[in-house]
Amino acid sequence: MMKYFWGILVAVFALVSCKSDDDSLQRIDQLLNIYVKNSAGQDLLNSKKTGSYTGFSVNDIFGTKDISPVSVSLRMTTDSLFYMEYLAGAKRRRLDSISPDNPGTGNSYYSKMQITYTKSTNVADNVIDTLEIQYRNTPTVFQVSKVLYNRVPVFSKDADAPTSINTVTITK
């Protein structure tokens, strides 16, 4: 009889401890869709168009090795526009825990990547750029806060902005 009592008691505690509180969950918002175009609006990631890049590679600058590839997928919209989809993979380093954008609200992190665009088989034709992604981390949200391309801001997001796919357009 005592064995049943302890079994039921453990089951009740297990059910009570599984109760979730949706307010205590942290929202994660870090997906980036990166479009690359020229000043005329041509999609530079469509390798079939003249003047576009034939490929690209992404390397984590903070990686453990000199060559630390980051997985970035090439995707296409229904309008046949190509974009790079970045979810995660690059190492993050801590910025100030108190920053001018969000003082005292948590920690800020950033990732830095090198993007090498290929135009032809000649290595001298490659274009090398840097992409820095800054993240805001609070108890309620982990999100992209700013994106810099070659040290120039190309995207920013307010702390109270809703979770969404972050769209970044690079004009080269």
Image (cartoon, rainbow, N blue to C red):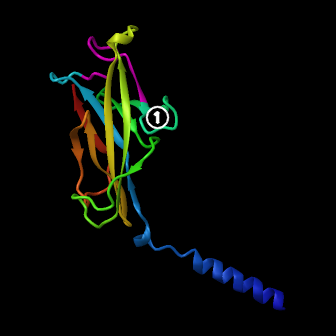
Predominant secondary structure, magenta span: loop
Q: Quadrant of the N terminus?
A: bottom right
Look at the picture and state if 44 lies above or below 120: below
Please name whichever residue, 99 or 51, is drawn nearer the observer in this view of the structure: 99
Q: Name the residue tied to disc 1.
A: 70
Determine if the magenta segment contains residue 49.
yes
Asked which secondary structure carries label 1, the reply is loop
Horizontal arrangement in the rendering, residue 121 relative to residue 6 (left or right): left
Q: Is residue 112 visible?
A: yes
Q: Position of residue 71 (x, y in %)?
A: 47, 34
Q: Is residue 165 visible?
A: no
On the image, which quarter does residue 161 sit in? bottom left
Tell me if 153 is positioned left or right of 89 in this view. Answer: left
* Residue at left offset 38%, top offset 35%: 113
Q: Extreme left residue here?
A: 40
Which one is in front, 137 or 95? Answer: 95
Q: Which residues are magenta?
A: 43-58
Outermost residue toward the top in this view: 122
The image position of residue 38, as x and y in percent, is 20, 23
Q: Residue 32 colored magenta?
A: no
Q: Position of residue 11 (x, y in %)?
A: 69, 80
Q: Amino acid at mark 1?
A: Val
Note whether 39 is above or below 104 in the view shown.
above
Instruction: Using a 10 Å C-alpha cutoff, classify the residue at mark 1 as few (fewer than 14 neighbours), some (14 to 19) or many (20 or more).
Output: many
